[in-house]
């Protein structure tokens, strides 16, 4: 077999995980002076033996699948100086893929089919035929400029945000030598960005060749493919193989896509070389993830790469069929589970995962005509809704940075695919508004659809809760002077999640005024403590310490409606016993202002409880800008000012509190924040209420709202501007006694639940809006306004001859709604379906039966 030079300290064996009976795999072995540093020459003898030749045979330098089963292959390299090194491969021989009836189209079939290629040529030749709003002429001009630059370049440099090292790349491409880890890192992934840069070049040049048929582009692609085929491996860390290596996915996607696009220009020998590299360096090592149902973005990327690579070569490498079937099962299961999953890595990694999934899904449709993945609800509904609901207000294309995320995201790929394949009008609006000249539009959008701005597309549904992942977005709209608040109390405990349950951010008129530090700094020290830990988020510290358990939150009650949005997060488990309870309720009232109510129970009354609020650096109270170290008047409002907009904050606490402007030592660059130090009662209980007023034109242009909070009957009465009265049950209780009404029993709010709201209703008038959170009854005096047979979240708004009910029901319930008129009909909003109901004229109550879930219904009086 092979022979390698002496001075050997180890060997690298190219990973083989799975074979099928009759499938052959070349045994690739290199002797090393140190990991990743190869010994040139031939002075060591390599031998291999199979523990079970009936399952797996060794024939010369090839491994041959014999029968279904498992076998261990021992590889030994012996140098002339007597040094020996040994590696073992655990290989499973599996049955070949069951033929599913999928037939592949001829090449090309990954980036585009032949029919799509011809349509693409036509669009480039006549840009005016492109969908309105898509700037094909500019995209093509910039793509040509990029491609010509790639043809001219003799190399390029890869730089890194968190490392001083660079990779200087020159042509012909050569496998990079290992680089030392930056301080504080283990296995820093230098190859991830390096492989992405190569993938980008391969896809761009292949696209240009497809449109122009200019052999210069094909020649460059051909040389890059042959260079990459000569690499020893496409994963960065030999001891880990393809585990945790994104480079394997990027190299494989780039090579497979380019191989398919320039297939007709390659000789039979060149095709064989590249195809073998795709199989040996791409597919076989990544098969480590066969049967791995982890939804981490790296696993997703590798599964997608296997799908695309197998589709590119399966007609000439039938053994690649098992990769199509295995990855299809993974992707389909992933999509099914993510609809109801409690895991999320934030919008940035949602975008990365969705883009990869869509790449595989659309490639499967192109290659085999199978649209079952690209039409899946997770891609067509769940993903785009998260992006739109957590987008900034003010027409700005920035996003809430919950978990590891940057505020700006390139959504051109996924949005253009949705516009084309799902006729998603909001996605079409997004790309034509923000990304009309991005390259993915050239490949993905040939017809498009009529665009609709989010205010039109989501009309009447401006807010939304995502209870499984513990996120909620409460917004007034997407327009120039609108606002949104993003709230998280999540059970997700992935590596890109932060210690930030019950945290929130706020955007007003396009400016992020209540903030999150964004993508964490992974280097140990104060910046990591701030960006990943609780101290950099709008949460609670106990005795100077934050949350210790990643995840641990849950959104345990929620409601969205035209007049009242509500979400309650429970982050108690995130503190792993350092407190007895922390629940945070966020209310969005009449699309005008927010109330944040914190219900805290300490282990000991002497424990130090501190609520943090991070905003803009411009913190102002009483007309003066406050510096770090300044004390605030906790009883007076203050503001976080942006460039134009602002948010005004007023607060109340159940016992005296101190408030100060603080900065975190070693992470001062992230700006100052406000720290409230709370006092608890003898039982360790504390409540804090904050009124947050969005001011799109600045605080000077917004009249100050009046916040009044009174402790009554074991609970709270919160009044805003005298018109809104909100009764909150006492700490840890579900039943609140009477509150409000100025002593008039007929105007006293009575509550069986966590929270009730009545707007208006002064002097016997009918209320304009009512709401009940996690409760069974809300009454005004003796008159029931809302009631449910089991704890429910519901809100009703009234007009002269119509009333709208919004309900979020954990389980099926009978709902009673008081009406100021005799109803003639009740219909389900969205479908127009008539709903049966009963009406009691003697007390003006309509009764309706609803299943678990979220519902909107409207009663109308007879004309």
Image: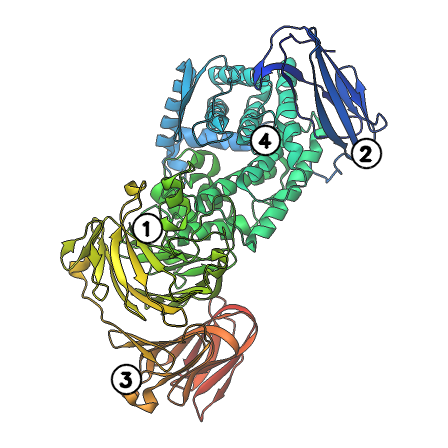
Q: Name the residue under label 3.
A: 762
Q: What is the distance, in whole Å, between disc 3 and disc 1 at their CAs? A: 38 Å
Q: Quadrant of residue 532?
A: top left
Q: Name the residue under label 2.
A: 68
Helix, strand or loop status at disc 2? loop
Question: In which quadrant will I find the N terminus?
Answer: top right
Q: Relative to 552, does residue 10 appear above or below in the rendering?
A: above
- Specify which label sits upstream in the sequence, 2 or 3: 2
Q: Relative to 168, does residue 495 appear above or below in the rendering?
A: below
Helix, strand or loop status at disc 3? helix
Q: What is the distance, in whole Å, between disc 1 and disc 2 at their CAs? A: 56 Å
Q: What is the distance, in whole Å, between disc 3 and disc 4 at their CAs? A: 69 Å
* Of labels 3 and 4, the one closer to you: 3
- Picture coordinates of residue 410, whole percent (x, y): 40, 39
Crowding around mark 4 (Cα neighbors within 10 Å: few <14, some 14 to 19, many 20+) is many
- Specify which label sits upstream in the sequence, 2 or 4: 2
Helix, strand or loop status at disc 1? loop
- Specify which label sits upstream in the sequence, 3 or 4: 4
* Of labels 1 and 4, the one closer to you: 1
What label sits on residue 515 in the rendered view?
1
- Specify which label sits upstream in the sequence, 1 or 4: 4
- Picture coordinates of residue 817, whole percent (x, y): 45, 81
Whether residues under marks 3 and 1 lie with C-beta atoms below 8 angstroms apart, the answer is no
Q: Name the residue under label 4.
A: 109
Left/right placement of residue 194 relative to residue 61 reads left
Q: Residue at 24% across / 74% down in the picture?
A: 721
């Amino acid at each position: 077999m092979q022979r390698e030079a002496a001075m050997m300290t180890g060997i690298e064996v190219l990973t083989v995980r799975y074979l099928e009976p009759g499938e052959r795999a070349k045994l690739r072995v290199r002797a090393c002076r140190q990991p990743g540093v190869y010994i040139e020459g031939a002075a060591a003898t390599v031998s291999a033996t199979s523990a079970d030749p009936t399952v797996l045979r060794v024939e010369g330098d090839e491994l041959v699948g014999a029968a279904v089963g498992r076998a261990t292959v021992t590889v030994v390299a012996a140098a002339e100086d007597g040094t020996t090194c040994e590696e073992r491969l655990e290989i499973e021989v599996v049955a070949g893929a069951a033929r599913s009836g999928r037939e592949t189209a001829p090449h090309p079939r990954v980036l585009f089919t032949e029919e799509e290629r011809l349509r693409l040529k036509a669009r480039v030749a006549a840009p005016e035929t492109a969908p309105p709003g898509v700037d094909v002429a500019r995209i093509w001009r910039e793509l040509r400029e990029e491609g010509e630059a790639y043809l001219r370049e003799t190399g390029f440099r890869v730089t890194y945000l968190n490392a001083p090292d660079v990779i200087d790349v020159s042509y012909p491409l050569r496998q990079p030598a290992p680089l030392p880890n930056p301080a504080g890192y283990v296995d820093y992934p230098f190859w991830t960005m390096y492989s992405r840069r190569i993938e980008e070049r391969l896809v761009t040049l292949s696209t240009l060749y497809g449109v122009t048929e200019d052999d210069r582009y094909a020649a460059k692609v051909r040389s890059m493919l042959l260079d990459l085929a000569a690499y020893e491996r496409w994963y960065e860390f030999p001891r880990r193989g393809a585990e945790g290596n994104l480079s394997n996915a990027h190299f494989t996607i780039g090579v497979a896509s380019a191989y398919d696009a320039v297939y007709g220009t390659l000789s039979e020998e060149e095709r064989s070389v590249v195809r073998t590299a795709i199989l040996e360096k791409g597919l076989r090592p990544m098969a480590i993830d066969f049967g791995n149902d982890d939804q981490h973005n790296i696993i997703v990327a590798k599964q997608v790469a296997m799908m695309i690579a197998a589709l590119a070569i399966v007609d000439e490498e039938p053994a690649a069929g098992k990769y199509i079937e295995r990855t299809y099962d993974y992707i389909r299961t992933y999509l099914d589970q993510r609809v109801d999953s409690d895991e999320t890595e934030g919008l940035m990694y949602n975008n990365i995962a969705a883009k990869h999934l869509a790449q595989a899904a659309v490639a499967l449709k192109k290659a085999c005509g199978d649209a079952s993945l690209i039409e899946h609800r997770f891609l067509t509904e769940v993903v785009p809704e998260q992006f739109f609901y957590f987008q900034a207000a003010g027409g700005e294309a920035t996003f809430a940075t919950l978990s590891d995320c940057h505020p700006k995201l390139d959504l051109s790929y996924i949005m253009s695919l949705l516009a084309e394949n799902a006729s998603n009008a909001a996605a079409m609006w997004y790309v034509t508004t923000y990304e009309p000249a991005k390259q993915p539009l050239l490949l993905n959008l040939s017809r498009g659809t009529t665009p609709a701005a989010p205010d039109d597309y989501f009309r009447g549904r401006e807010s939304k809760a995502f209870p499984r992942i513990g996120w909620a977005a409460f917004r007034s709209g997407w327009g120039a002077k609108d606002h949104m608040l993003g709230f998280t109390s999540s059970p997700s405990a992935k590596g890109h999640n932060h210690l930030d349950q019950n945290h929130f951010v706020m955007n007003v008129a396009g400016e992020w005024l209540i903030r999150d530090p964004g993508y964490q700094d992974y280097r140990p020290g104060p910046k990591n403590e701030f960006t990943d830990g609780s101290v950099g988020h709008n949460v609670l510290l106990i005795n100077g310490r934050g949350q210790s358990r990643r995840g641990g939150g849950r959104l345990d009650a929620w409601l969205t409606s035209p007049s009242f949005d509500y979400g309650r997060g429970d982050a108690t488990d995130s503190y792993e016993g350092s407190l007895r309870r922390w629940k945070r309720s966020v209310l969005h009232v009449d699309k005008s202002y927010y109330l944040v109510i914190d219900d805290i129970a300490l282990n000991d009354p002497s424990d130090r409880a501190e609520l943090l609020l991070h905003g803009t650096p411009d913190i102002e109270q009483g007309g003066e800008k406050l510096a770090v170290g300044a004390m605030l008047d906790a009883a007076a409002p203050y503001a976080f000012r942006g460039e134009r907009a602002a948010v005004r904050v007023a607060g109340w606490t159940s016992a005296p509190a101190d408030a100060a402007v603080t900065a975190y030592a070693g992470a001062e660059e992230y700006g100052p924040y406000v720290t409230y130090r709370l006092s608890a009662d003898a039982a360790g209980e504390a409540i804090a209420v904050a009124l947050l007023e969005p001011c799109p034109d600045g605080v000077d242009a917004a009249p100050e709202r009046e916040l009044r909070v009174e402790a009554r009957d074991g609970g709270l009465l919160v009044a805003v501007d005298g018109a809104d009265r909100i009764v909150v049950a006492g700490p840890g209780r579900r039943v609140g006694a009477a509150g409000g009404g100025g002593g008039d029993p007929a105007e006293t709010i009575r509550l069986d639940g966590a929270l009730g709201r009545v707007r208006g209703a002064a002097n016997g008038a009918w209320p304009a809006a009512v709401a009940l959170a996690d409760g069974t009854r809300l009454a005004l005096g003796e008159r029931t306004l809302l009631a449910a047979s089991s704890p429910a979240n519901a809100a009703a708004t009234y007009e002269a001859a119509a009333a709208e009910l919004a309900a979020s029901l954990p389980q099926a319930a009978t709902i009673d709604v008081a009406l100021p008129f005799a109803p003639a009909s009740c219909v389900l909003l969205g479908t127009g379906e008539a709903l049966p109901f009963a009406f009691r004229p003697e007390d003006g109550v309509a009764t309706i039966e609803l299943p678990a879930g979220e519902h909107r219904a409207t009663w109308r009086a007879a004309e």
